[in-house]
Amino acid sequence: MPGWKAGLAAVAALLILGVVVLLARSRAGPPARCAPGMVPLGPRCCGEGQRLEAGRCAGAPGRCAAHLTPTPAGCAAPSATVPIAAGTLRLGPSDWEAQGIVGAAREAFVPAFSLDAFEVTEQRYAACVAAGVCPPLGLRGEPGLPVTGATLDEAARYCAFAGGSLPSRDQLAFAAAGPSGRRYPWGDTGAVCRRVAFGLKAGPCGWGATGPELAGSHPDGAAAHAGGRLFDLAGNVAEWAAPDLAGDTISGIHGGSWVDGAAAALRSWNRRLVPVSTRAPDIGFRCAYAR
């Protein structure tokens, strides 16, 4: 082989090797967890142009995830509701991850209702406090963060102020699973960091988080049957449901949270019973409305 041909072959081989190395490095990197318009800063996803200060996304963002609005204080979700048509919630032993469903299948008819598109945020809760209806809570100063630390009674008080009520366990499960009984709000597979805010305290999606992400900052995980307009029904904050019976001293929280490190906590029917007086940094809520 002439020398020039051998030289070209060597260059081609080096180029191919370089491409292979770059692909390998990209696939071995950390999982993508922030939506377009957001940037990873420590365990948080902040708006473009923001900085991380003591765990907070600080500064005015130039851009936010789809559906979120840039404000001088950060990215924030609008106040919006999504209508959900009546249907039958079907869960049963064939669901290989089903929690608390042993033996017989369970079906429940769910009348039509509307549900908050986003978890109730600090911005929305502050309006209830200003009206003298809701008690003050320890807010963190980011308008788009979901409010946490509310007891069930305080969450119900806010929902009454907003013209609704806490959703029932069946309403939350049906909103997440849809008529087809999906394992996760977006489908039956793919519990990955870009779709849901989980595993932010001790992995796999982040380390050292002290609170949830901005409500609605993971649009890839929106509920499929609601046209992609219902956000964070899995992860971010676990959400209060109304007690099964009036006067119950325990109630369910649904959907897993930023603390959970296992995908099993994110499934549509995941429910954990806690005392109604519980205050926790990973428990929030959204409201349901009659139709």
Image: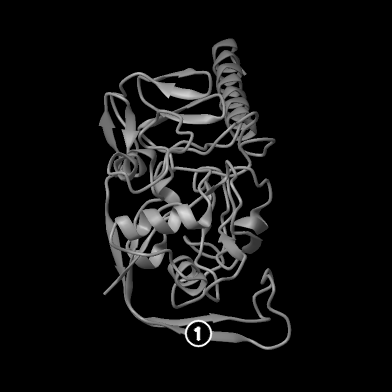
Q: How many marks?
A: 1
Most distant residue in the bottom direction? 104
Residue type at the position of mark 1: Ala
Going by the image, does 19 lie left or right of 117?
A: right
Q: Residue at x 61, y 51 (%)?
A: 278
The x, y position of residue 205, in whole percent, is: 61, 38
Would you place residue 222 above or below residue 121 in this image? below
Front residue of 11/99: it is 99
Q: Residue at x 61, y 30 (%)?
A: 20
The x, y position of residue 123, in whole percent, is: 33, 38
Disc 1: CA contacts within 10 A as few (<14), some (14-19) or many (>=20):
few
Front residue of 104/111: it is 111
Would you place residue 261 above or below residue 100 in this image? above
Q: Residue at x 41, y 50 (%)?
A: 119
Most distant residue in the top direction? 3
Question: Is residue 233 among the parts visible in the rendering?
Answer: no
The x, y position of residue 107, in whole percent, is: 54, 86
Going by the image, does 287 lie left or right of 9?
A: left
Where the C terminus falls, by quadrant? bottom left
Question: Is residue 281 among the parts visible in the rendering?
Answer: yes
The x, y position of residue 189, in whole percent, is: 57, 60
Q: Residue at x 55, y 76 (%)?
A: 245
Most distant residue in the right direction? 103
Where the N terminus falls, by quadrant? top right
Q: Quadrant of residue 145?
A: top left
Front residue of 135/263: it is 135
Most distant residue in the front direction? 132
Indicate how the structure is coloured in the image.
one colour
Would you place residue 8 above or below residue 242 in this image? above
Q: Which element is circle 1 on? A: strand
Q: Which residue is mark 1?
A: 108
